Image: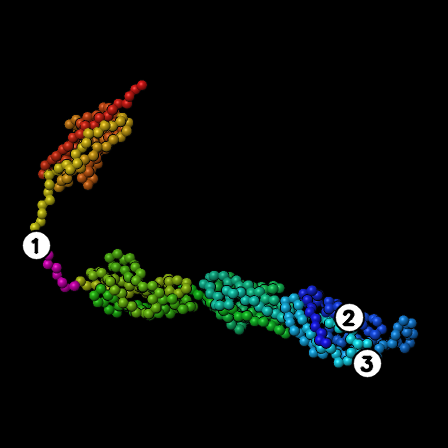
Amino acid sequence: MRGKATREALACGPEETASESANVPTTEPSGEVAAPKSTGEEPAPKPQEPAPQAPAPAASKPAPPTEDVPSAPLLLAVEDVSDSSVTVSWEPPERLGKLGLQGYVLELRREGEAPKIRVPRHLRQTYVRQVGEMINLQIPFQGNPKPQASWTHNGHALDSQRVSVRTRDQDSILFIRSAQRSDSGCYELTVQLEGLEAKAAIDILVIEKPGSPSSIRLLDVWGCNAALEWTPPQDTGNTELLGYTVQKADKKTGQWFTVLERYHPTTCAISDLIVGNSYSFRVFSENLCGLSDSAAVTKELAHIQKTDIVAKPKSFVEQDFSEAPSFTQPLADHTSTPGYSTQLFCSVRASPKPRIIWMKNKMDIQGDPKYRALSEQGVCTLEIRKPSPFDSGVYTCKAINVLGEASVDCRLEVKASATH
């Protein structure tokens, strides 16, 4: 016969024995229930004999002989463990006693919880911050009773002037108000509890913008091309470079234009330069923080020389485009309503540009504020502001240049509004 019992681990308190939950007490031959074993490691006390001086009570009986008491079960083993229960099994004892086996007593003792550190996902790889930024790391841990937590930086104690640590029941917080490059390194959290310990390492990298390339020089200029060479910066900002940005500027304009971005080699050839121009070049370094604050600039200019080919233009006869004024679009008769501004249009062609004169009933109206004359690209416009019946008449547009003159006429009729 093989014994087996499952104990709900979360149901019992720290001092509750499994004999109460298993409910399988052992009955002695006298009919009394044996006391459960202690929750400690001491064996269960044997029945004590009555003191010789005091008379035994009438109801008491002598302790059972050794052969009446069963021996201990055999091969006690843990078969399964879950979050809320544990399953154990055992074999029957070799000696069952005269009365036979009536049950088992199963006891439980709760131990302390081993320490454990739970590192957040974003801290399982190198934690990168820029110089001047704040570092605030909260690392949860568990253990029962409360474990002792301590930090180290590259294997040494923390600098209390720069780093603050606050440890609570379930986490430890490491705080740096303004990060510096010297704060980079491996920070190790150690949690200790009753001889057991757990450790977690967090790598922090504090970076800043890189320095500019140490020097740059113009190697060669040929055709519409220029070759450059520079040396890497002495300070990369505490991290690797993402590359270089190369720019050019024409001496005439002085404006910088980017030619290459995140370029890794330290030599390059720049093409498609304009013949006859002179160029300066500069190079920036770049890392995760961005471009360097300054750049290395070439001291000499790259002059893109013109070729020796001389163009021989063909002879041609210059044409004379002079022309006397002529109207390509005449004025059209127009009817308007009093109080509503109206416009007269015509177009003229002439070279050189003609002088335009507007007249009403053969009288020059230049300078009259009631009229506004415009002339653009050969289109002549006369605007009559809020005309009245007195503005009716014949309007003339005359164009005059050194080669002659031309004019066109139209009739404007402003109808008076009907009265009722």
Q: Residue at x 57, y 68 (%)?
A: 117
Q: Amino acid at mark 2?
A: Pro
Q: Are marks 1 and 3 in contact (CB under 8 Å)?
A: no
Disc 1 element? loop
Which portion, as a residue range, is magenta?
307-314
Task: Say above or below: 24 vs 97.
Answer: above
The residue identified by callout 3 is 67
Q: Amino acid at mark 1?
A: Ser
Q: Nearer the viewer, residue 68 or 172?
A: 68
Q: Amino acid at mark 3?
A: Glu
Q: Are marks 3 and 2 in contact (CB under 8 Å)?
A: no
- Label 1 vs 3, first from the N-terminus: 3
Q: CA distance from mark 1 to mark 2?
A: 129 Å
Q: Nearer the viewer, residue 252 or 26?
A: 26
Percent of width and height locating residue 397: 16, 32
For disc 3, the neighbor class at 10 Å (few under 14, some 14 to 19, many from 20) is few
> Is the C terminus in the top left, top right, bottom left or bottom right quadrant?
top left
Disc 2 element? loop
Residue 145 visible (yes or no): no
Percent of width and height locating residue 268: 29, 68
The residue identified by callout 1 is 315
Task: Say above or below: 390 vs 146.
Answer: above
Q: Quadrant of residue 194?
A: bottom right
The residue identified by callout 2 is 25
Q: Nearer the viewer, residue 27 or 40?
A: 27
Magenta stretch: includes residue 309: yes
Percent of width and height locating residue 239: 42, 68
- Way the structure is coloured: rainbow
